[in-house]
């Protein structure tokens, strides 16, 4: 099977710059695209900082780090970036209309056979693929944050995704030194978001029922199951607004078992969105995070 030698990454934000760096570290040439020079600069600065950490911990030499950085070419033209690559990975915000618009642009500019992947966390791959003339080339490659360090790529097939496209997505995962979990049916929340939200909502319900404190629920899950973070700490890390949106789309798909508990909705209404807002399930204003009421 042919290797992936070049990719275009569309979107240089939290996930995009990490995916670009992962590809460049695997020797793949990367064209990184965003709408403004400033966004590209921020993405490239994040890559530079991350590479410096690899050098400091002696996981990369300075020379290798410079070569990785040089392998990423940043630019604002999607058309130029996707024209001659083996694979395009779309990493723009989780808005279906925006993703479909980007996929139409990729479809117009990319050569035949280019794999078109999306990093969506839960949107339907089939719906995104409906925007293009070659849905057999579209697939979900869901990376995790931080993309450079996290080993999993959840690979999701749309209804029309071809075997070749699946093989190429698995090949990319292999080249990056990551592991794939394949979601065979394109269903809302795939494997990871559906399972993680179910667990989190049950933890929130236990807190609301007075079964245990926020800290004890997180401690139980961390120490009892070897999770690096408890479900509520993790929700603070990823954003309560993101978690609420996930729950709402899962409720639309699977019914009331995914209904968001009121203590989650109330926190989002109050702007308590997690770490990025200074408070969520925990308050981060003091020396140590303290559970909120
Ligand atoms: N943040 C996470 O933890 C995480 C984890 C897994 C998956 N995801 C998914 O990854 C995707 C991106 O999330 P993110 O957190 O990186 O978002 P982000 O907001 O950090 O980055 C998105 C980037 O896309 C750029 N962009 C917007 N419109 C564009 C366009 N027309 N052309 C090119 N670039 C454009 C933005 O300027 C921004 O830099 C979403 O689908 C999200 O659900 C996020």
Image (tube, rainbow, N blue to C red):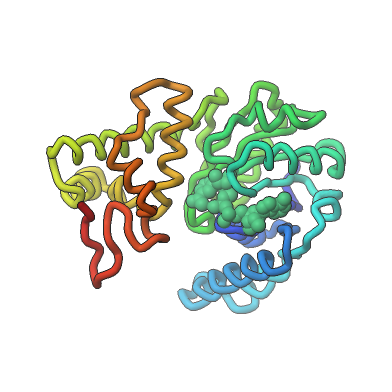
The residue sitting at the front extreme is 270
Q: Is residue 19 left or right of residue 192?
A: right
Q: Horizontal placement of 13 versus 138: left or right?
A: left
Tell which of 102 and 261 is nearer to you.
Answer: 261
Q: Measuring from the top left, give residue 86's x and y in whole percent.
A: 78, 46
The answer to whether any part of residue 143 appears in the image is no
* One can see residue 262 in this view: yes
Q: How many marks?
A: 0
Whether 245 is drawn above or below 255: the answer is below
Looking at the image, residue 150 lies above or below residue 118: below
Taking depth in this image into account, of 196 and 153 the one nearest to the observer is 196
Which residue corresponds to the image point at 63% horizontal and 72% vertical from the top-left? 64
Residue 32 lies in quadrant: bottom right
User: Residue 77's x, y, as percent?
Assistant: 82, 57
**Residue 97's image quarter?**
top right
Q: Indicate the position of residue 227 as horizontal and vertical percent values.
A: 30, 48
Q: Residue furthest left?
A: 211
Residue 40 position within the rendered picture, expressed as x and y whole percent measured from the top left: 68, 65
Say left or right for 70 vs 203: right
Residue visible at 16% across and 35% down in the picture: 209
Q: Residue at x 30, y 65 (%)?
A: 284
Q: Is residue 58 above or below residue 8?
A: below
Question: Could you tell me which quadrant the N terminus lies in?
Answer: top right
Query: Residue, x 69% and y 26% (percent of image)?
Result: 161
């Amino acid at each position: 099977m042919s290797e992936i030698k070049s990719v275009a990454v569309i979107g240089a934000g939290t996930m995009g710059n990490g995916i670009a760096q992962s590809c460049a570290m695997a020797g793949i040439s990367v064209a990184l695209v965003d709408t403004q020079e400033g966004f590209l600069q921020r993405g490239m600065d994040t890559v530079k900082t991350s590479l410096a950490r690899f050098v400091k911990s002696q996981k990369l030499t300075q020379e290798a780090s410079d070569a990785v950085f040089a392998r990423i070419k940043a630019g604002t033209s999607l058309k130029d970036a996707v024209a001659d690559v083996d694979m395009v990975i779309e990493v723009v915000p989780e808005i279906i209309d925006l993703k479909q618009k980007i996929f139409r642009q990729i479809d117009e500019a990319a050569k035949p056979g280019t794999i078109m992947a999306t990093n969506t966390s839960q949107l339907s791959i089939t719906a995104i693929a409906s925007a293009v003339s070659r849905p057999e080339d579209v697939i979900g490659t869901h990376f995790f944050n931080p993309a450079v360090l996290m080993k999993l790529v959840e690979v999701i097939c749309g209804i029309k995704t071809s075997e070749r496209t699946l093989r190429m997505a698995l090949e990319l995962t292999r080249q990056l030194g990551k592991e794939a979990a394949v979601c065979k049916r394109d269903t809302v929340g795939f494997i990871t978001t559906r399972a993680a939200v179910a667990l989190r909502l049950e933890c929130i319900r236990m807190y609301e029922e007075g079964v245990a404190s926020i800290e004890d629920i997180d401690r139980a899950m961390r120490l009892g199951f070897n999770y690096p973070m408890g479900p509520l700490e993790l929700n603070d890390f990823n954003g309560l607004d993101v978690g609420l949106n996930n729950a709402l789309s899962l409720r639309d798909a699977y019914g009331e078992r995914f209904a968001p508990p009121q203590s989650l909705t109330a926190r989002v209404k109050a702007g308590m969105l997690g770490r990025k807002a200074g408070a969520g399930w925990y308050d981060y204003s003091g020396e140590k995070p303290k559970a909120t009421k």
